[in-house]
Amino acid sequence: MAKQFYITTAIDYTNGAPHIGHTYEKVLADAMARFVRLTGREVYFLSGLDQHGQKVQLSAEKAGVPPQEFVRGVSDKFIALWKRLNVQPDGWVETTDPRHQRVVQSLLQQLFDEGQIYKKSFSGSYSVRQEQFLNDKDREPDGSWGPQWGLVEEREEENYYFRLSAHADWLRGLLESQPDFIFPANRQTQLVNAMKDSEGVDLCISRPVSRLSWGIPLPFDAGYVTFVWFDALVNYISFAGFRDASPDTSGLPKWENLWPCDAHVIGKDILIPAHGIYWPIMLHALGVPDDQMPKILVHGFWNIDGRKFSKSEVAEVKPLTVLKDFDPHSIADVVGSDGLRYFLLAEMKTGQDSDLTEERILFRYNKELADILGNLLHRTLNMARKYLNSVLVATDHDCEMHQALRATVAALPSRAVEHMREWQISEVLADIISTARQANEFIDKTAPFKLAKDPANAPAVASIMRHVVETVAHLSVMISPVMPDTAKRIQAQLGWTAPDNITLGDLKWGLLPDGHILGEPQPLFPKVLPPA
RNA sequence: CGCGGGAUAGAGCAGCCCGGUAGCUCGUCAGGCUCAUAACCUGAAGGUCAGUGGUUCAAAUCCACUUCCCGCAACCA
């Protein structure tokens, strides 16, 4: 079996409800997965949730429920949102899964046995209320500890550490020899720079059970649980069937078919140090060879009014007219789940930051989706019904404009593949909308609504209609990775269904055969107008 | 001299790697069309490409410096 295309997302922390940032990343990865499938390659898409840790434990206590119950509630919110937005991973991570815990413990035991994990003590300022050590970053401008920390005292604690520093030179070498380890390239530069002045610092991987009980116990010391890194990051391999000799591997894929990962899709906030330093070094320490290192795709953030997205600042945003707020559900309520998917992927150039504004959301929806694409289908089906009784027939009629339209459509797949080499989905979408514009222009220039007045022009009218309808059929397939529901709705109106396993290579002119009967026109994207 | 990104028509962006008198979408103004979700198509106005200096026959594009904006700053044990 050929190696599958393996794509993952960061796993989201189950401490609060999903917001637009979580949503973008999952929609991006989902569209990437669907696109790669459209090229004919098998794909395994993994996503999920990080459920352990201090904050979850505290939030659960505050809510007065056991952590399991708290985590379940938040997890279900993520699951419901992904379902609504057609984010469909093949594998689903929940770090409380026993299959995951077994792999984590096995890895830790291996590293402990090899002497890569050791115990040492640390002393520092400790906030009793927040149950955590503080550092200088947490101080107020005047150097004092803020009231949110409560009583701060000096405390000493023993913990387990992973010998991260022992592998720093190896990582520097890897970054030099594999310049495409991280995309976009400037992120790799940033990482290399960040490592220049790195000192010999090791990674703390544990917490005493007395402080943190909601986690995976260390296999070699029952007094501690695993702290974040060896729990969360390991999901990428534990749920990929790594070390699947354990008794229960039900539902897990075959490791040999997946690894190495083709794209760890993450936000720029967790590249350094987690995914850029800890993760490759962990893999290296575990014996993963250099040519089996994963690829990392770093995406940007959504800004609101030019500033970083933050809950406290949302209130200062200029008033919205039709959106309730920028919650993913609120946006989908107005422009639909595909409208939201389209906006997120059309608006952001993969790897960079973008602004999130109501104006842009409505523009993308009303102008591009409703006016250009939706209206194209609508006007065409309407004319086909009037002039052709909705039946496609063969004619010899042809001219330069027909040829030009066919050429544009024929070039779409290869252009899309080219753009997707750097995951520029926004460019693929721009091509699709541009093609729809060309089809609108084609209609205006050839004017079938005028030709139809004279029966002698019947072949020309039939040919024009057929060209536009065929174009829309191609567009429906091209746009399906981003708007899966819309693709189906377009096809339903065309009276056509693309085969489930259709690939870009199947997109030859003539998807709709002679005698094909078109369906009824129905506005695809009802306009969203602000209240008067 | 901490690191990275950005500064291009009223707005949002592309072009910069591989120098050759600036492009896309929206908005504005004017026109066309009438099949269509008051949708579609065409044309026009609008920019000395943040600033200064340098390299060059020629710079938005290369180099240096400056200004402003955004984000990050691994050791949260």
Image (cartoon, rainbow, N blue to C red):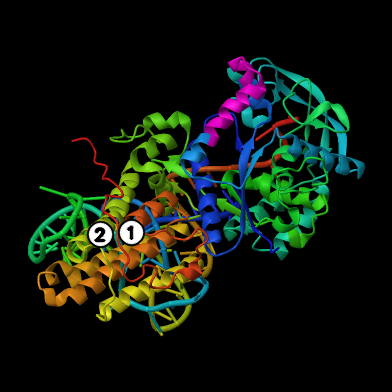
Quarter of image, res B31 = bottom left
Return the residue nearer the eye: A506 or A278. A506
Left or right for A64, reference B67: right
Please tell me which residue is depicted at 42% across the width and 69% down the height of the picture.
Answer: A412
Which residue does the numbered mark 1 point to in the structure image?
A494
Q: Chain of mark 2?
A: A
Q: Quadrant of the N terminus of chain A?
A: bottom right
Q: Nearer the viewer, residue A66 or A228?
A: A66
Chain letter of the residue carrying label 1: A
- Amino acid found under the numbered disc labelled 1: Leu
Given the image, on which type of amino acid does mark 2 rest? Leu
Whether label 2 touches label 1, CB < 8 Å: yes
Which residue position holds label 2? Answer: A381
Write the start and end of the magenta stretch as one range: A60-79
Q: Quadrant of residue A217?
A: top right
Residue A369 vs residue A140: left or right? left
x, y percent for residue A348: 44, 52
Quarter of the image for residue A105 reads top right
